[in-house]
Image (cartoon, grey):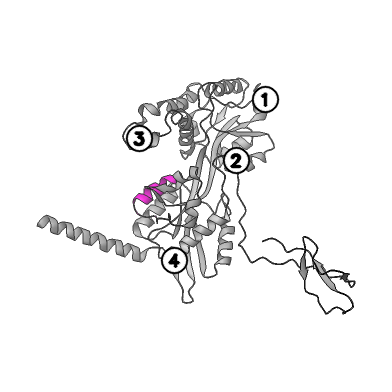
Amino acid sequence: MKRSGRSLAVATTVAALAMSLAACGGGSSGASGDGTVTLHVEAWKGGGAEPANVAEINKAFEKTHPKIKVDFEYITAGDTYTQKLQTELLGGKAGDVIMADTDKMGKWGASGYLADLSKEAWASRIAPDAKQFTQADGKTLAMPMELIGIGLYANTDLLKKAGITEVPADWPTFLNDLAKVKKAGINPIALPDKSGWTGESVFQASGSTLVYQKNKQWDADFLGGKTGFDPDWKAPLQQLKTLEDKGYVNWKNELGVDDWSQGPQDFSAGKSAFWYQGAWQVSNIKKAGFPVSFAPWPGGAAGTKPNGMVFSGTMWAVNSQSQQADAAREYVKFCRRARTWPSISRPSTRSRRSPVARPRRAPRRRPSPRPSRKAVTGSCRPTPGTAARPRPRPAPRSRRTCWARRPPLRP
């Protein structure tokens, strides 16, 4: 009896805590006296060096939703963002709409912090290959803002100086090319890793070929306890070690180079033949003036092609504790219409930062040119491809007159 009483007390306490969190959720958002709602949005894009058109999207959203004001907060990516959101979610004070990647979506979704968006109309239209990034336990918990490929950049001018005419497509060729470049006195490859992002990304890129070509269901097997990291991921780890053993990369030195600032600057200055980064850097690198190639990491055996491009996903999620849930869902839906993210089936070699889609408005008829004083006589049947227009004044009975104009613009 004591045990059941204690369980009941704990359950009551948990329920009361959940109700208190829901009551104070949503941070600074709320409704004013005139019915205007303030929506708090938190993201690691939308400011700094990654504006990502977020400001334009917010402005367009407020214009089409005059009763919803967006309180946008830009937070530095990485640990700063994660730690801030973790604390706010735990205290019920996080934004109504928050940015997440696949990893954060899985963790926050499992803790019940993200609303189920499966019933939203746009959820059924997510590309099949992208659904795995947006779902957890069969529920859609986020809307893709962008999915961008991450791959190997090559300065083809430097490759030509080393006698290389083609970008490597497999691991043995890649190692041979690195050796030729080094022999020519050129830094073979730059993998700046101060934040740990580059090393992790290269490791995953190598595994996308070495692991998933052998077993496309590796994730499911791992979660089911049928396999493990050892020995499946030993080969990708060995590739990273080989780069240092052969003198192409000094991982210790790379830990002192920033992935996001110094790395792009160095490659744009022509300081290395190869570099690993996301496709969002393509437009910036092209400004350097030299030809650049962007392709998947060449981690496979001789004569084989890479399994595919590794993608980075940025998504919008709705805080399950939000008091402005309807406005938050409307914001996510609007972002879905306002952006066109890259196709999964055909990775782009350019950074596609699509312009904001203009809100749909009722189609307007193009004003017709001022008609000539001379009327068109004859039949009033409109000319093919034109629309009849009412006469500005009654025509003389002695003849029939009609006016023609250009067809209206299509909406």
Amino acid carrying mark 1 in the image: Lys
In this orientation, does residue 219 appear? yes
Q: Which residue is mark 3?
A: 222
Total number of numbered discs in the rendering: 4
Distance, label 2 to label 1, CA atoms, is 24 Å
Q: Give me the disc on residue 160.
A: 1
N-terminal of the pair, mark 2 or mark 1, is: 1
Amino acid carrying mark 4 in the image: Ser
In front of the other: 58 or 303: 303
N-terminal of the pair, mark 3 or mark 2, is: 3
N-terminal of the pair, mark 4 or mark 1, is: 4
Residue found farthest to the left: 1
Are discs 4 and 3 less than 8 Å apart at CB?
no
Q: With respect to residue 254, does 387 lie above or below?
A: below
- Can you tell which of label 2 and label 1 is closer to the viewer? 2
Amino acid carrying mark 3 in the image: Phe
Q: Position of residue 125 (x, y in %)?
A: 51, 51
Q: Quadrant of the N terminus?
A: bottom left
Distance, label 4 to label 3, CA atoms, is 41 Å
Q: Which residue is mark 4?
A: 29
Region rendered in magenta: 102-114
Q: Residue at x 84, y 68 (%)?
A: 379
Q: Quadrant of the C terminus?
A: bottom right
- Secondary structure, mark 3, is helix
Q: Give me the disc on residue 348.
A: 2
Distance, label 4 to label 1, CA atoms, is 57 Å
Distance, label 1 to label 3, CA atoms, is 43 Å
Are discs 2 and 1 less than 8 Å apart at CB?
no
Amino acid carrying mark 2 in the image: Ser
Q: Position of residue 349 (x, y in %)?
A: 61, 39
Q: Is residue 62 magenta?
A: no
